[in-house]
Amino acid sequence: MSSPYEGEMAIDTEYDIVMARKAVRTAAVALGFGVTDVTRIVTAASELTRNIYLYAGSGIMRWHPVSGNFAGLELVFEDQGPGIADMTRAMQPGFSSGNGLGMGLPGSKRLMDEMDIVSEIGKGTSVRIRKWLRR
Amino acid sequence: MANGTISVIKVRGILLVTVPPDPDDIAVCELQEQVLQAMARHSAKGLILDISMVETIDSFFARTVSETAKMVTLMGGLTVLAGMRASVAITTTQLGLSLDKTLTALDVDRAMDMLVSALDGTERTP
């Protein structure tokens, strides 16, 4: 890990959720996000890495800066798990196909500025989230 | 990371538990068990969970905390969640987590006041 701004890590165990939170916190702070946005980004990363751990067993998280009208941070969560059968329901607060709270996907979307999900049954899921620095 | 070393202090029949800054899921579960065992061991009537050091509360953490409060109620105790940071309060609410049945206080000092007066009240009723 040469730069705090970007990196990649495997999500295989419960403890990797903590490691993911730490890495994302470091990147968000380094990019200049304020304490509330840092907390939002770290919390979304915690939810999405936990989804990988709970539903796919393992996967990866990647993070890097992005630029558009503003500078921002993008996080990508990829797994080769079962995929999401019903995306509309998965985005409803309170719906969970497992034993989760059903807050992970809709909650993370609310905490971030952008969220895209690509999922294919039996192939896996890729969730991309972005937060922009507004100055 | 707390390796089973969570600080539990008993003051005037109330347990004061300081939650570590960034506990993993296992540490959160251990905390729940240790707190409940300490409630029984110390015959405590109240519990203050000091979360002022906690920087992130995700759905798992929130669920475990609200479950712990319910369990403490079953054991005849009262729980106050103390010291939630502003950034955590914003994030927890926007994430859609519900801790609304849990008593809260701005800091440990106020939590102690709340519990002392609540418990005084219950003791006077015959």
Image (cartoon, coloured by chain):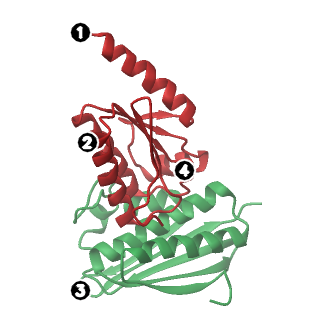
Which chain is drawn using red? B
Q: What's the residue type where badge 1 is placed?
A: Pro
- Residue at screen point 66% across, 80% down: A5
Q: Residues within 10 Å of mark 1 (few under 14, many from 20)?
A: few
Asked if residue B19 lies left or right of residue B65, the reply is right
Q: Quadrant of residue B23?
A: bottom left
- Residue at screen point 49% across, 29% down: B112
Residue hosting label 2: B71
Image coordinates for residue A133, horizontal then vertical, percent: 70, 65
Q: CA distance from mark 2 to mark 3?
A: 39 Å
Mark 4 and mark 2 on one chain: yes
Q: What's the residue type where badge 4 is placed?
A: Val
Q: Is residue A113 visible?
A: no
Asked if residue A85 lies left or right of residue A75, the reply is left
Q: Which chain's residue wears label 2?
A: B
Asked if residue B93 lies left or right of residue B46, the reply is right
Q: Looking at the rendered structure, which numbered label has been put on residue B126?
A: 1
Chain-order first, disc 1 or disc 4: 4
Residue hosting label 3: A122
Residue hosting label 4: B88
Image coordinates for residue A118, horizontal then vertical, percent: 39, 79
